[in-house]
Image (cartoon, coloured by chain):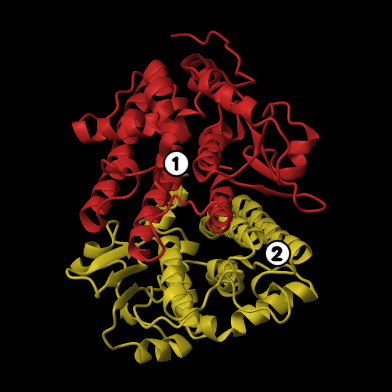
Chain colours: A red, B yellow
Amino acid sequence: MTDSGKVYHRSCTGPALQTVQQHAQEQDITLFAGCFCPFVQRVWAALEYLHIPYKDYEVDPYQKPQELLNVSPKGLVPALMLNAFDPPRALNESTVILDFLEDIAAKSTHRSLFPPSTDPYARALVRLQSDHISRTLVPAFYRYLQAQDPEAQISGGKEFHAVVQSLVELFERAEREVGGTGLWVEGGDLGWADVMVAPWIFRATNVLKHYRGFEMPRGAKFEAWLERLFEHPAFKKTCSDEELYLDSYERYAFNRPNTSQVANAINSGRGLP
Amino acid sequence: MTDSGKVYHRSCTGPALQTVQQHAQEQDITLFAGCFCPFVQRVWAALEYLHIPYKDYEVDPYQKPQELLNVSPKGLVPALMLNAFDPPRALNESTVILDFLEDIAAKSTHRSLFPPSTDPYARALVRLQSDHISRTLVPAFYRYLQAQDPEAQISGGKEFHAVVQSLVELFERAEREVGGTGLWVEGGDLGWADVMVAPWIFRATNVLKHYRGFEMPRGAKFEAWLERLFEHPAFKKTCSDEELYLDSYERYAFNRPNTSQVANAINSGRGLP
């Protein structure tokens, strides 16, 4: 496979495009978004799930408008502008925004991605899943996708497979100890760890499959989780058509220079920005 | 300076030893601790601040007892054993444990390290500080301390100074936008970010100063924060005498092989374990 020079997309397609069109009106919250960015997709799916009103504002992450730099010091999406304040305030970092949305929803829509506060241990198990996703699974995704040397690709694939497996073990532990969290168990609803990981699990089934021949772990239980995750309305309505992801991630798959701050961090062995 | 081969300590000294002795009785929570570990100190200071009863159980992190491996898959401290469950349950990862302790305290002692839930934006600013500490400040500390080459030591010192400065800017932003968080403002009380960062800021004033000649940022406001932080009872009672830290960190300062999983991660350019 050779680098065909495909360029990243600048606007959503498919179900995601419809969602964007439904969120064009001014609201207290403006989401600064990028159509192929998985960190954005986390926040976007949470906004949908928590029923929090927002305006979607797509920006080109490689041609950062000044407005983006005003709300996000590193110029990274996702970022929120909070228009109810005068002057407006801003928040960045996907995990910080997720916690903020939970706090907002607790007071307004009374929805939550977490187990109830009456069960601190169940909540801690979700935080443990989430910690594994942020610190281990997400960096392993990029190391694998950016690996050029065949041996590094093989070990990257094994590593990514193993970290997905470790997440499954954390889900199984939660099932055993507290009856399950999120969508892992049949009848469960979308949970915090589901939202945290879904964008990369989804890209594993298209981007990693296409560029690296990656095969997801097998098993009826795992496949049922995948289906519940990808078919959940709050997630599905944030998904574009496959072509958008394949085109937009070619630059990562061939590790083109200056692909992104995330790609640079992986290449230099530093933590993600 | 040459590596004198000092060995790490296995038990607390000074104020921390007194605190250990006061927490020898069985409780619903057992803290698996290590006397020089900053990740432990976070959790320990939070337990003290939140007034949550616990038993302190010091373990040797280099001679891991089977009990530790039972509660912490990587054999890392801090870990909690939750004895109220039958069979007992376990939690690991300092940040996961901190969130768990907050949830516990919300129901029992009604204390919290966070701004009130009525101010989600103020809480988000604290999460932003905390994110910077975990992902940027803590790794920069170890890169600096483990750097052997003089040039790497100089750049490591500049980097660590800059990331402390960035934390100060986040504190200043919170002061400007929500009147301040934690101990940064005079009259404030210990906060989440204070607890998250205190162990490394403290080690910067002894370990980094001794082995790298590091000088903290200056300024009346910064120095007043340092004093409030180091003198806060919940933190102070978790501190041993200086010699314990200088001895225990010599292995990091000379980057001895197999110093720790944290040291290995920094040497290999991976995220912290």
Please tell me in which quadrant of the rendered image residue A214 appears: top left
Q: Which residue is at the front of the view, B55 or A78?
A: A78
Q: Nearer the viewer, residue A131 or B273?
A: A131
Q: Residue furthest right?
A: A87
Which residue bears the numbered disc 2? B171
Q: Amino acid at mark 1?
A: Val
Badge 2 sits on which subunit?
Answer: B
Residue B206 shown left or right of residue A119 in the figure = right
Residue A150, picture quadrant: top left
Residues A107 and B176: in front is: A107
Q: Position of residue B140 (x, y in %)?
A: 57, 55
Chain letter of the residue beneath label 1 in the structure image: A
Q: Position of residue B38 (x, y in %)?
A: 47, 69
- Nearer the observer, disc 1 or disc 2? 1
From the image, tell me which residue sits under label 1: A195
The residue lying at 76 percent from left, 70 percent from top is B218
Q: Is residue A122 above or below residue A250?
A: below
The x and y percentages for residue A63 are 73, 26
Left or right relative to A224: residue B252 = right
Q: Residue at position x 53%, y 80% from top?
A: B235
Per the image, label 2 sits on a secondary structure element best described as helix
Q: x%, y% of residue B16? A: 44, 85
**Which quadrant of the figure has residue A153?**
top left
